[in-house]
Each structure stands twice: as C-alpha cells, then as structure tokens.
Image: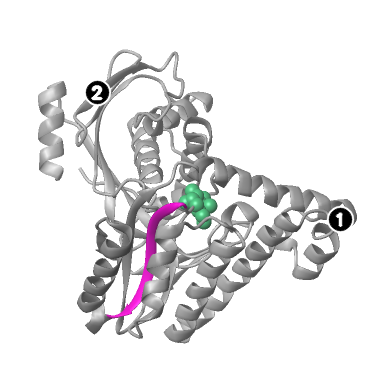
Amino acid sequence: MLQALQQYFFELFETAPLLFRSPGRINIIGEHTDYNGGFVLPAAIEQAAYIAISKRSDNQLHLHAMSLNESIILSIDSLEPIPHAWSNYIAGVADQFIKNNKLVGGFNLVLNSNIPIGSGLSSSAAIECVVAYALNELFDCKMDRLALAHLAQKAEHHFAGVQCGLMDQFASMMGAKDQLIKLDCQSLQYEFIPFNIHHYTLVLFDTNVKHSLAASAYNERREQCEQAVEWISQSVPDIQSLRQVNMPMLAEYVLPKNELIYKRCSFVVNEIQRVESACTALKNGDLIKLGKLMFETHQGLSADYEVSCKELDVLVETVKNIPDVIGARMMGGGFGGCTLNLIQTAAVEKTIHTVQHVYAKTMHTSLPTYIVETANGTSRIA
Ligand code: GLA
C-alpha cells in the first residue's frame, strides 16, 4: 500500500512526498458519552488512512483520492464545505489551520485508506487526524497531539456538519498498540488499560448499511442532552454536563418536562457508569461481566437512545443465542455500521459462519467481518 501510494504521488506531482498514517478506532463501551463529559474506552485499530503530501509554492490544494481515482483542486483563499465530498475532511482541516493562522501555503496530497467507510470505525476522523498531523509537521506549527485532535474535531463540526465529541479524533491521534484508552471527556485526563481479553477475540460484524438520518439524528441527540442540562442547571447550580447528573435529578427536573428527553438522558447517565464498571471488570479479568455490560449498552442504545436499526438489532439478537459470544453491541454513532462482539477465540470461525448465514437469510446482504487488532496512533512513516 505504501509503495503504491508513494509511486502514485510521484507520477502525479513529480516530487517525493512525506508519508503519514492515522488509524480508525473501536470503542469497547461508553457510547454517546463523549459530548456529555463522560468516559469512553476506545482503541486505535490496524486499519488506517494514509496520505502522501508535499508543499506547493502557490495557494492551491491539489487533492487526490487514490481508491476513487478522483481529483479536486481547491484554493486556501476560499475553502468551503462541498456537500458529501470526500475532500471536506482534508479541506476542513486546512480551514482550521488557516483560522489558527497556521497555514502558510498550498499542498499536494494523495489519500488512501483501508478503513471501511460508513462502518462506524471513524474513517473520517482518521483522515482529519492524518491531515492535521501532516500539516503540523509540513508547516512546522508545533501543535501537540491534543491540540491537533481538537482541531480535527472542529473540522468535522464545520465541514461535515456533525457535532461530534472528541472520542474518535482522540483515539486516532493517541492510540497505542495493545492498549485501550480510558478517556475522561470532562477533564481530558486519560489512562491506558492493557487490552487483555485472554481466550476471547473482538470481532466486528459490518451491517453494510449506513442510514441517511445518522448525522441529523446525532445532532438532535446532542441537543436533547444539552436541553436537559439547561433545565437541571436552572435549579441545581454548577451543572455543566450529564456527567454531573444522576437519576434522581433526571426524575425531578427532566421527566416532568419531557419524557423522551428523560429516556435519552437515562441512557447516558447509566452508560457513563457502565464504563467505570467495564474498566473494573477488565482489570479483574472478568470478561463475562464485560460482555453483560456490552449487551446492556446495546439495549439502551436501541430502546432508550434509539440510535440502533433493524440490521444492528438482528445481529445482536442472533449472537445472544450463541453461548460462545459473551457480549455484543452496536458501536459508534449508530443507524448502521458495525456490531462489536466478544467471542471465544476457538469459536470465532464457526460463529462468523453462523451469523453470516442468518444475516444473509434475514437481511439479504453480505456481512463483512473484521477481527480487531489494536494499533498505535497517528504517525509519520516516511
Ligand atoms: C461518533 C462521534 C463520536 C461519539 C460516537 C458515539 O463516532 O464521532 O464523537 O459521539 O459517535 O459514541
């Protein structure tokens, strides 16, 4: 992949590039908690976005997506989001550099990625992070990884229109092989927890669907959580996010106003707690408990937060009947993408076969599967 990328770049631009990569991510537990100041437990994975890049002497961005064989030329003097364009994830980051007075010129860039798109593995965050990291180095901006993750997140807000939390960009930028990151999204303190699941393997089942309401529903969920915080803070001072909220507060200040928002927030308050329980279970090697928590998370995401979909629910229901699968849940923002499954290593192949069979019969589509391998965060590779 790298040699091909280098070669491709050279043929297009007749100059030697720098090469960078930034990984996709999984999240063990802690879904929709990041923008609520809660905990998340992600890890960077092997699949990554790669770019080859060099400076230009003018103000143009010459961008090329290798797998699509598409090119676009933009100018740093007039960067605007283009509806549904892959270039938004690059232009959005360049735009943030300009807004921070850091971008001093144009660049040539070729992108390639082996992160499945729309699978909830944060292919867009990986592109934003790899571009942010590369521009920081190319233009000698001296920003640290955390600042770059924040900048990449802002690019997603402004150029992709998703008001995401920090989890995806943080995991891509800061990931470490064989480690999970327990991130406190309120203080931004984090600790690495060794990814040690003994005789079990994490497997992703990819629904192969991404329903179109994902972005608007995501933003709506975020607004509902913020609405609840506003209501509570009218009576309880110093409440800034659902992190500081408990169930009695929800019952007293939110339930009388809006039952749906109460349901949404109950999920978040419980989910923040589940991350703590999951970390304890992991540290104690109690994977059965971890698996139970994953099933609980799915139940909450499906029934209370309502970000699941038929395909995801079918996958989780199917594995509930297989004793070798001790935990499963939908992962990421929702409305499609992957389920994450904790499976007895010896039974992985058999299980994949069974689930693929059921999925083909009920959903009439294939079920790509990926075994999770953790990886290091964003880096320069040449
Ligand atoms: C998406 C967002 C993240 C996070 C998850 C849900 O991946 O980009 O910030 O909110 O959804 O946990």
**Whole-Å distance between the Cαs marked 2 and 1?**
52 Å
Q: Give the vertical position of 103 relative to 216 (above or below).
A: above
Q: Give the vertical position of 131 relative to 165 (above or below).
A: above
Q: Position of residue 306 (x, y in %)?
A: 57, 57
Q: Is residue 156 magenta?
A: no
Judge the density around disc 1: few (<14), some (14-19), many (≥20) Cα neighbours within 10 Å.
Answer: few
Q: Quadrant of the C terminus?
A: top left
For image coordinates 44% across by 85% down, the residue present is: 288
Q: Amino acid at mark 1?
A: Pro
For image coordinates 32% across by 84% down, the residue present is: 324
Q: Amino acid at mark 2?
A: Ser
Q: Is residue 341 magenta?
A: yes
- Closest to the camera, between mark 2 and mark 1, is 2
- Residues marked 2 and 1 touching at CB (< 8 Å): no
Residue 27 visible in rendering: no
Q: Position of residue 303 (x, y in %)?
A: 58, 64
Residues 224 and 166: in front is 224
Residues 363 and 164: in front is 363
Return the residue at label 2: 71
Horizontally, is 268 left or right of 165 in the view?
Answer: right
Q: Position of residue 31 (x, y in %)?
A: 53, 60
The residue stretch that appears in magenta = 335-344
Return the residue at label 1: 237
Residue 297 visible in rendering: yes
Horizontally, is 340 left or right of 218 in the view?
Answer: left
Quadrant housing residue 56: top left
